[in-house]
Image (cartoon, helix red, strand yellow):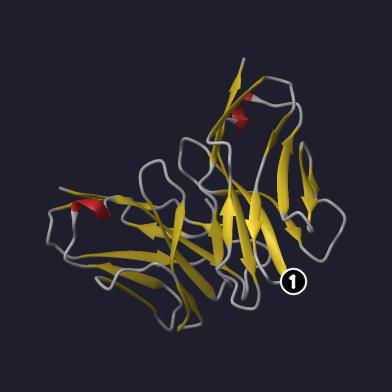
């Protein structure tokens, strides 16, 4: 157990639907990061939050949004889902800047049918 | 924008032998960090080793070591005495400060053969 908790572990939904992925960071970590990993590909950076504030944004689609709450947990909202959104979504956390590396959750496997 | 390139999509090595995975990166920054992550079939992302760009000494963690060549922007991972449990995808990653968002390469799939 890495200390980063992601729920749900698996999610199957239909095209056009909206889903919410949840992440609880490791205790003491203030930064949360979201990544998308499509089948057998690398990790694409989506967005970063630090202590409730958006800090960096990567290749995140306009249909996707995220937020970090006062208790530091984060949610990634995916709307108007398409087949191509099927992927493994990782959340990671770190102490402040992450220069000691990120701690990753086990991911949420999203399948859009 | 920073880019990370892993030119070896797949590699294999015999158990107990040594293998080196390559990684190059492109940046105009001077203050940054480099990482190698391992992703076994379980899909969990596991930090293997990290390197601070301002340190010339190569990082070592047990059987894992890096060859960091800052001028060449190269950051290779050497795995000594390979074990079956080393079979995984290996991702090279770059992170610059102060933002701290980590960017990953496409990965190298390593298979350790008995």
Q: Is residue A109 something that shows in the picture?
A: no
The number of discs equals: 1
| Residue at (76% x, 31% y) in the render | B80
Is A74 rendered above or below residue B6? Answer: below
In front here: A102 or B30? B30
In front here: B84 or B66? B66
* Residue A59 x/y as whole percent: 39, 67
In front here: A65 or A61? A61
Is A58 rendered above or below residue B92? Answer: below
Taking the view exactly as shown, the residue that stands out farthest to the right is: B57
Which corner quadrant of the image does residue A85 belong to?
bottom left
| Residue at (74% x, 22% y) in the render | B17
In front here: B92 or A111? B92
| Residue at (24% x, 70% y) in the render | A63
Q: Is residue A45 something that shows in the picture?
A: yes
| Residue at (36% x, 68% y) in the render | A60
* Mark 1: secondary structure: loop
Is B113 rendered above or below residue A62? Answer: above
Taking the view exactly as shown, the residue that stands out farthest to the top is: B114
* Residue A86 x/y as whole percent: 27, 50
* Residue A104 x/y as whole percent: 51, 56
Q: Which residue is mark 1?
A: B30
* Residue B9 x/y as whole percent: 53, 36
Drawn side of residue B91 relative to residue B74, left or right: left
Chain bearing tag 1 is B
Is A50 rendered above or below residue B32? Answer: below
Q: Residues within 10 Å of mark 1 (few under 14, many from 20)?
A: few
Drawn side of residue A41 relative to residue A104, left or right: left
């Amino acid at each position: 157990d890495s200390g980063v908790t992601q729920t749900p572990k698996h999610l199957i939904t239909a095209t056009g639907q909206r889903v919410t992925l949840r992440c609880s960071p490791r205790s003491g970590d203030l930064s949360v990061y979201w990544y998308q990993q499509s089948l057998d590909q690398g990790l694409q950076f989506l967005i970063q939050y630090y202590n409730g504030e958006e800090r960096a944004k990567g290749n995140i689609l306009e249909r996707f949004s995220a937020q970090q709450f006062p208790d530091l947990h984060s949610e990634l909202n995916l709307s108007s889902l398409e087949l191509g959104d099927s992927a493994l979504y990782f959340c990671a956390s770190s102490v402040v800047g992450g220069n000691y590396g990120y701690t990753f959750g086990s991911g949420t496997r999203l399948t859009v049918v | 924008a920073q880019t990370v390139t892993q030119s070896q999509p797949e590699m294999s090595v015999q158990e107990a032998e040594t293998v080196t995975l390559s990684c190059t990166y492109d940046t105009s920054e001077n203050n940054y960090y480099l990482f190698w992550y391992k992703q076994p079939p379980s899909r969990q992302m596991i930090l293997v080793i990290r390197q601070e760009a301002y340190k010339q000494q190569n990082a070592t963690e047990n059987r894992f070591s890096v060859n960091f060549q800052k001028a060449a922007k190269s950051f290779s991972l050497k795995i000594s005495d390979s074990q079956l449990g080393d079979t995984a995808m290996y991702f090279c990653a770059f992170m610059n400060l102060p933002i701290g968002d980590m960017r990953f390469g496409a990965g190298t799939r390593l298979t350790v053969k008995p």
